[in-house]
Amino acid sequence: MRTLGNRKNEIFQAKLKKEAAEVYPSAVQLIQRLRNKGFRTAVVSASKNCGSILESVGLIHLFDVKVDGNDAEALDLQGKPHPATFLEAATPFRRGA
């Protein structure tokens, strides 16, 4: 038996294939400016759809690191309000990678 959350996610994924997510141009411009100045960027989201959304709108390339709900689950990271996902996203930057 499917859980309600799994069904909701299936519906969302199907909708995402038909309709692009809304993009805020000012946010994209800010990230592009920061990257042009040499800043490294990461995106952190509790959503398991973060990567799919960024790929669907062609913005995944703007981030050096992505930690989303799938990564958190795979790495057994605690969720909000615990900072584990943010610390995971910062790890490559701390190592100088």
Image: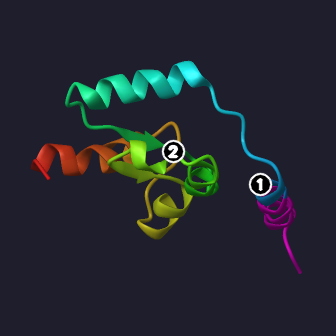
Tell whether 79 sits left or right of 53: left
Residue 59 included in the magenta stretch of the image: no
Q: Which residue is mark 2?
A: 59
Please state the horizontal and vertical placement of residue 45, each as a whole percent of the image. Answer: 53, 44
Q: Quadrant of the N terminus?
A: bottom right
State the residue at coordinates (21%, 51%): 92
Q: Residues within 10 Å of mark 1 (few under 14, many from 20)?
A: some
Q: What secondary structure do most residues of the magenta stretch adopt?
A: helix
Tell whether 81 sits left or right of 91: right
Tag 1, which secondary structure?
A: helix
Tag count in the figure?
2
Q: Are marks 2 and 1 in contact (CB under 8 Å)?
A: no
Q: Give the amino acid type for the residue marked by disc 1 in the picture.
A: Leu
Please state the horizontal and vertical placement of residue 33, each as a whole percent of the image. Answer: 34, 23
Quarter-wise, where is residue 7 in the image?
A: bottom right
Magenta-highlighted residues: 1-14
State the residue at coordinates (62%, 46%): 57
Q: Give how far apart the Cα atoms at labels 2 and 1 are.
A: 15 Å
Query: Is 25 rendered above or below residue 6?
Result: above
Query: Is 25 rendered above or below residue 76?
Result: above
Tell whether 88 sits left or right of 3: left
Label whose residue precedes the other's in the sequence (2 or 1): 1
Q: Give the amino acid type for the residue marked by disc 2 in the picture.
A: Leu
Q: Residues within 10 Å of mark 2 (few under 14, many from 20)?
A: few
Q: Nearer the viewer, residue 65 or 56?
A: 56
Colour mapping: rainbow
State the residue at coordinates (51%, 44%): 59
Q: Which mark is residue 16?
A: 1
Query: Is 35 rendered above or below residue 13?
Result: above
